[in-house]
Amino acid sequence: MAMIADSAILVTGGNRGIGRALVEEALRRGARRVYLGTRTPLTHADPRVVPLALDVTDPAQVQGAVEKVESLDVLVNNAGVALYDDLSDLAAIERSLAVNFYGTHGVIRAFLPLLTRSHGAIVNNLSVNAFAPLPLIPSYSISKAATFSLTQSLRAILARRGIAVHAILTGIVDTDMSRGVDIPKASPDAVARAIYDGVEQGLEEIFPDPMAETMEKSWREGAGKVLERQYAKLYEETTYESAPVGQEASAS
Ligand SMILES: NC(=O)c1ccc[n+]([C@@H]2O[C@H](COP(=O)([O-])OP(=O)(O)OC[C@H]3O[C@@H](n4cnc5c(N)ncnc54)[C@H](OP(=O)(O)O)[C@@H]3O)[C@@H](O)[C@H]2O)c1
């Protein structure tokens, strides 16, 4: 189980919104080093913070970031974009997937050797829209559902390396991203605290705000979670010989 105190942690999209709150909360909890992924140059008063130029869609920047990180215990994939669309514009779907899905996947792949060494944790900031699409932002919802599925598969696959994989099913939070929506919103600080509380408790899914909490009980006790566990057990019992990675599966 990952503890934030004395750990080295990387937060993508750490310059504003929930990401900034996650950076500050990690510092408050005594993190040894906080790598702050940002697309714009910045400085931070706390000497434990190391800003990293990190556009998650840029493989060269991702590799450059890996080379600047000495060790890593917790990777927080927080960077994300939400576009208003109606699924008529392929570019909106592609952009949402590029940042929210492929960006997350690419960063995880790049930092996997460091996380394997530390038996660390991956924390993916998703959305309740992974469960129920909001038709105002359908491409975003698709990307979050896909990244939730990625998170569930990686949890089973990476268990063999001793890496924990957490899904954050976030509801509405008061940041630039939700500016156009006029309903009660959780504060980024409260959400950051709930995320790290959940990580420190070893929760596979974390519901970090009042809106998300309404889904928690039914998810934990529901058929989807039961099936996820059954599949994970099946995977655990399957040898690489009988299911070689890279070959086509013969059954769904
Ligand atoms: N706010 C909500 O209600 C809500 C609800 C559910 C889930 N979430 C999720 O929480 C996460 C943070 O959202 P937020 O509310 O804090 O949004 P935000 O205030 O709009 O911040 C988004 C962050 O992601 C970064 N980012 C965007 N594209 C990037 C890229 N290609 N590479 C690296 N960083 C990139 C932004 O950097 P720049 O400053 O350079 O643009 C910014 O730091 C997102 O994954 C979002 O989907 C938010």
Image: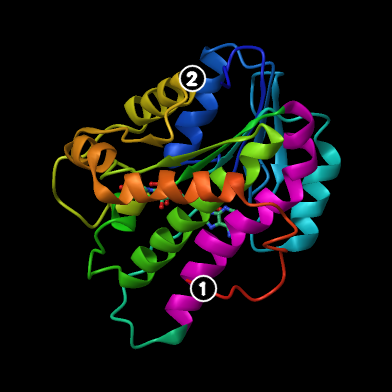
Disc 1 residue type (three-letter)? Ala
In this view, 238 is above or below 196: below
In the picture, measured across the screen, residue 170 lies left or right of residue 25, that is: left
Image spot of residue 169 (x, y percent): 35, 44
Disc 2 residue type (three-letter)? Glu
Front residue of this view, candidates 183 and 125: 125
Q: Can see residue 13?
A: no
In the picture, measured across the screen, residue 134 lies left or right of residue 78, that is: left
Front residue of this view, candidates 76 and 35: 76
Which quadrant of the view contains residue 61?
bottom right
* Label 1 near ligand 1 (CB < 8 Å): no
Residue numbers of the magenta segment: 91-118
Q: Main secondary structure of the magenta part?
A: helix
For the point 45% across and 63% down, the residue is: 146
Q: How crowded is mark 1: few (under 14 residues within 10 Å), some or many (20 or more)?
A: few
Image spot of residue 142 (x, y percent): 38, 68
For the point 43% across and 38% down, the residue is: 18
Q: Is residue 28 magenta?
A: no
Which quadrant of the view contains residue 165?
top right
Residue indicated by mark 1:
251
Residue indicated by mark 2:
200
Residue at disc 1, secondary structure: loop
